[in-house]
Image (cartoon, grey):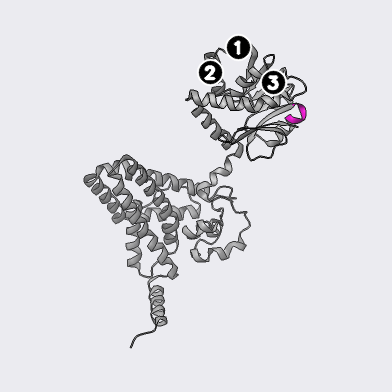
């Protein structure tokens, strides 16, 4: 007599409850480690075929170490997955081989972290796990030395670095080192088994990962808008990040004569009608951030042959490159003066025209204040609504210039 499907489902759930100590959902953690092992082995196979494969394998292994240590090992050390002590020890050994980190050492280090003890204390590692890691590394060196040197070792260091970043960022903005900062993104917490509920975890360290979301009302500290791997961006000003990115693109332009010509031509085409529409021709012009590739200076020097220029840039290196560039192009140094400092409207607004860059580093209010003191020719993204007469520089560059009203 065939048993109904409900009976088989009941028996499967019963066996899962008997196998796992806290929840049958812990099977997902175990399955995740096997999936990680398969992907890592495939990546190491590719590492034997090319240098690009080695880079890919190192990245896969490093990210895998970070994920497994924080999503699986972390939950296992707080709440052992299995009812059987033998299975828990076997799983410890499996995780040790998978990430190359003795789990007893990792557990001791992490529990000291929760206790608030100094991080430099010594921890005793079980001999079998240390020997297992040593045996694995020796086998890799003997069997596939190129994989160990160019994929495994770099990936291992990457994984440790990512774990360090995650560990630091999970406590950024916390009231004390013993507190955590949470992130409630659904996708992240699905794949990282609620690791984002880090403040809840620190307040209730013995709580199973499936029940951490229910502890959210007990947390007063505001959560982060970013997962821990990206939380360092909270310490970086958006304008500084934008400025760094655009400066990197400027360095690319400096390597190509044709790119330089294209950029000067497109900017001249956009600026010319705006300059011609001014009721008075500017005589004193300040260019903010005109280092590296001084295209605004080159364009305006031709459009305003009687004008004198002042370039305000806080980077000594950028100014040096701009000076060298102008020397090679026989630009009259008598028409321009460089000031190595940050732009301040109270000091630099005594000009007929101020030109501000797309990669301006600072507060938007600074540019608004400058517009109250002088005419401003502003570089903006193409999608920014213009506040005055505007011309598109290039659809390819996604830029426009606006003469601020």
Instruction: State how far apart marks 1 and 2 are (Cα).
Output: 12 Å
Residue occupying the point 56% across, 20% down:
322
- On the rendered image, what quadrant is the N terminus found in? bottom left
Q: What stretch is highlighted in magenta?
A: 370-374
146 lies above or below 279: below
Residue occupying the point 53% across, 20% down:
321
Query: Dot 2 corresponds to which residue?
Result: 325
Label 1 sits on a secondary structure element that is loop
Tell me, yes or no, whether the two marked residues, 2 and 3, touch with CB atoms within 8 Å.
Answer: no
Image location of residue 386, percent across then percent down: 70, 37
Query: Dot 1 corresponds to which residue?
Result: 332
Q: Does the magenta stretch include residue 381?
A: no
Image location of residue 72, percent across then percent down: 42, 59
- On the rendered image, what quadrant is the C terminus found in? top right
Query: Dot 3 corresponds to which residue?
Result: 285
Image location of residue 21, percent across then percent down: 42, 70
- Can residue 306 be seen here? The reply is yes
Instruction: State how far apart marks 1 and 3 are (Cα).
Output: 15 Å
Q: Does the magenta stretch include residue 372?
A: yes
- Judge from the rendering whether residue 27 lies leftward or rightward of residue 236; answer left or right: left
- Can residue 125 be seen here? The reply is no
Q: 10 Å neighbourhood of mark 2: few (<14), some, or many (≥20)?
A: some
Image location of residue 305, percent across then percent down: 67, 14
């Amino acid at each position: 007599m065939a048993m109904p499907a409900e009976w088989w489902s009941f028996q499967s759930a019963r066996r899962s409850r008997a196998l796992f100590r806290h929840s049958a959902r812990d099977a997902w953690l175990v399955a995740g480690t096997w999936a990680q092992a398969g992907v890592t082995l495939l990546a190491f196979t590719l590492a034997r075929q090319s240098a690009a494969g080695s880079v890919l394998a190192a990245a896969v292994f490093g990210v895998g170490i970070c994920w497994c240590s924080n999503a699986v090992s972390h939950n296992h050390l707080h709440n052992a997955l299995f009812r059987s002590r033998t299975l828990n020890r076997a799983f410890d050994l499996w995780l040790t081989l998978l990430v190359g980190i003795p789990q007893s050492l990792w557990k001791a280090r992490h529990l000291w972290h929760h206790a608030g003890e100094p991080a430099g204390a010594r921890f005793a590692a079980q001999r079998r796990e240390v020997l297992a890691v040593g045996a694995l590394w020796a086998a890799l060196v003997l069997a596939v030395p190129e994989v160990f040197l160019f994929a495994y070792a770099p990936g291992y260091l990457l994984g440790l670095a990512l774990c360090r970043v995650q560990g630091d960022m999970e406590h950024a903005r916390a009231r004390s080192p013993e507190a955590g900062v949470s992130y409630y993104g659904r996708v992240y917490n699905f794949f990282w088994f609620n690791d984002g509920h880090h403040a809840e975890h620190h307040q209730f360290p013995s709580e199973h990962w499936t029940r951490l979301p229910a502890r959210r009302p007990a947390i007063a500290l505001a959560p982060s808008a970013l997962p821990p791997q990206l939380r360092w961006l909270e310490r970086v000003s958006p304008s500084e990040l934008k400025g760094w990115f655009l400066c990197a693109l400027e360095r690319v332009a400096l390597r190509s004569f044709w790119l330089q010509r294209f950029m000067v031509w497109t900017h001249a085409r956009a600026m010319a009608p705006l300059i011609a529409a001014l009721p008075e021709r500017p005589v004193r012009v300040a260019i903010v951030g005109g280092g590296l590739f001084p295209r605004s200076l080159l364009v305006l020097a031709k459009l305003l042959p009687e004008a004198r220029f002042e370039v305000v840039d806080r980077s000594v290196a950028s100014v040096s490159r701009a000076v060298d560039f102008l020397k090679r192009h026989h630009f009259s140094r008598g028409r321009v003066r460089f000031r190595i400092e940050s732009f301040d409207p109270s000091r630099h607004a005594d000009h007929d025209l101020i030109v501000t860059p797309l990669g301006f580093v600072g507060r938007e209010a600074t540019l608004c204040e400058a517009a109250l003191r002088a005419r401003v020719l502003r570089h903006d993204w193409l999608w920014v609504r213009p506040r005055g007469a505007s011309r598109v520089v290039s659809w390819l560059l996604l830029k426009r210039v606006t003469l601020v009203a």
